Amino acid sequence: MKKDKKEKKLSVQPMMTSNYQATEVENKKQSWKPFLNLVKNVKFPWLMIAGVTVLMLVQSTLVLLLPQYTVEIYSGNFSASLAVTATFVILGQALLLAVIDFIGGYVSAINKMRLQNYVWRRVSRLPMSFFAENEPRDLISRTTDDTSNLSGFITYFVGYVLKGAYSFIGSFVLIFSYNWKLAASMAICLPLCYILSVVAGRIYFKLDNRIQSRLSDMTRYFSAILPYVTLTKLFGRENREEENGCWWIDKHFETSMKNAVAEQAVAFADTFITVLQELVIILMGVWLIQAGEIDVSIWIAFYIYANTMNSNFNTLMAQWESIKRNQGASARISAVTNQEPEENNGTLDAHEAHGDLSFNDVSFAYRDNSVVNGISFTAHDKQLTAIVGPSGAGKTTLLKLTERLYQPNNGSISLADTDVKDYELHSWRRNIGYIPQDPQLFSGTIRDNITYGVKGEVSDAEIRSAAEQANALEFIEDFEDGFDTEVGENGAKLSGGQRQRIAIARTLLMNAQIFILDEATSSLDSDAETEIHETIEELRKDHMVIMVAHRMDSVKDADQIVVMEKGQVLSVGNHDTLMKSCPLYRDMVQLQSAGIAV
């Protein structure tokens, strides 16, 4: 049991610390800049927001008129014109509130849509280095929850502020016109309301951020564990993961309880101040009536105006609290949207370039950790270049540099003697057919997945041709629905070999010139691997093929083999040459022949 507790601390604490401490740092900043950047960059429907604001001001005007008619009625004026006017004012208030709610809801929906579009467009253009350091679940939260919170704030904030200020000042002026002592009595409690709102705003800002952080951490943990329940059970770790999950739930509960206690404390203080204001109004009114300075009708008007003034002052202070709450959401969104997008200064069309792909003294480090260092070799057009080496040699990183998912720190990569940076980024990537060890398929049909990378219309004949070249047509036609067969989430209804061949068909249909296979056959059975190798043999006739492999027998027929170790190229040659000149390559072949993994 003690061991389990120790393991729990080791597995849970690091995740909590990074997120929670980052939130605490952000709480201390409380900058306006993120919010102002969003207002500047997102095209909100300002005309409609202004319309909502005007309607709120008109509704406030009607609210200010009603107490005056109430005074006249209590003074004995029961004329038909006064009754009609008072009725018009009351109905007008109700109608305007309904219109404001309807239009405001529509505007909030537009704000939410445009915020989400803006965030999503920025996210889709971010470099891979950003995704390597940020969890997808955090990005989803910022795209959905935080944008939802901000959308209503942007819709109503200006209106609430102007309405509150207008009604507050108007009520105060009218009260002063009745009796200056009444107006002075109302000012007694306002400083208390102001102090309470400022303090509450700061508390809500910090606690909202902490709750979001805790919720994000808890969601991350469950999302990481639930897909691997089978593994948890096989290793008998249910107790450990149960305790870890409960630990996260408890932490989220603790933060939520702190927030609830703070909200209740603020609510209690607000109620106390409201009761104090009511007592002041009543006692001041009774004293002035007894002194003969005002009559009952004036006191009733004063009472209504006083409540209106208090309500609008609270509305103004609530906007301060709302600002502090939404500062956190703005900061979280801006942490994504302020990132620099991928560099894309190239103008050349990669599909028009034909030739060899050269690596010229390429070096790359990730977080000051050197991954590849001084790589130089050439992959020739219409040939198969295999890259081999021990785990951690930098093989996959080299492929990512080729695809321009990362940029070299030093050196360059060129195609047909032209630096790849000179090619337009999307054109370059469409010119590369990348097939990983576990190809990613989207939920949908086989047809959807094969045509995913194609721009414009594509005929059935072209789809069949690509499937046939990838040795996929036979098994596709064996399905009852053929190309319209649903593949399931990430191709779960297909075997590994079938997913690989669909991925190859997809890249063939893109008319890519360069094919990159990253351990594409390592997890396949012998029959599927044979079929994939047959496909590769066809590809190398008309395309440049670069293949990373662990199985040494799969690279023997490559035109050239690049041997890597510790981020450097150790040797380049064909199988026979390397068996004679490269001890590492020879050892890897011999070890695998003996059934030992390398």
Image (cartoon, rainbow, N blue to C red):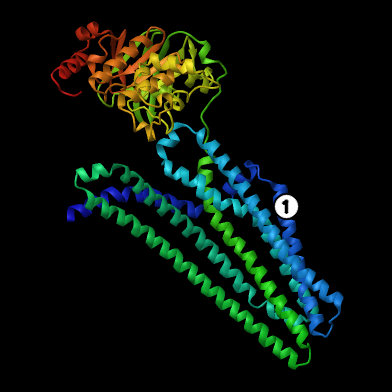
Residue 31 in percent (x, y) is at: 56, 51
- On the image, which quarter does residue 56 sit in? bottom right
Amino acid type for the residue under numbered disc 1: Ala
Q: Is 335 left, or right, of 392 in this rendering?
A: right
Question: Which residue is drawn at the image coordinates 63% and 76% (left, top)?
Answer: 189
Quarter holding the C terminus is: top left
Seen as rendered, the residue at the extreme left is 594
Q: Is residue 309 above or below residue 397?
A: below
| Residue 95 rendering spot, x and y as whole percentages | 72, 63
Quadrant where the image shows the N terminus:
bottom left
Corner quadrant of residue 465: top left
Label 1 secondary element: helix
Left or right: 159 as drawn, with respect to 592: right
Q: Nearer the viewer, residue 68 or 579?
A: 68
Residue 592 appearing in the image: yes
Position of 224 relative to 409 (above/below) = below
Which residue is under mark 1? 50
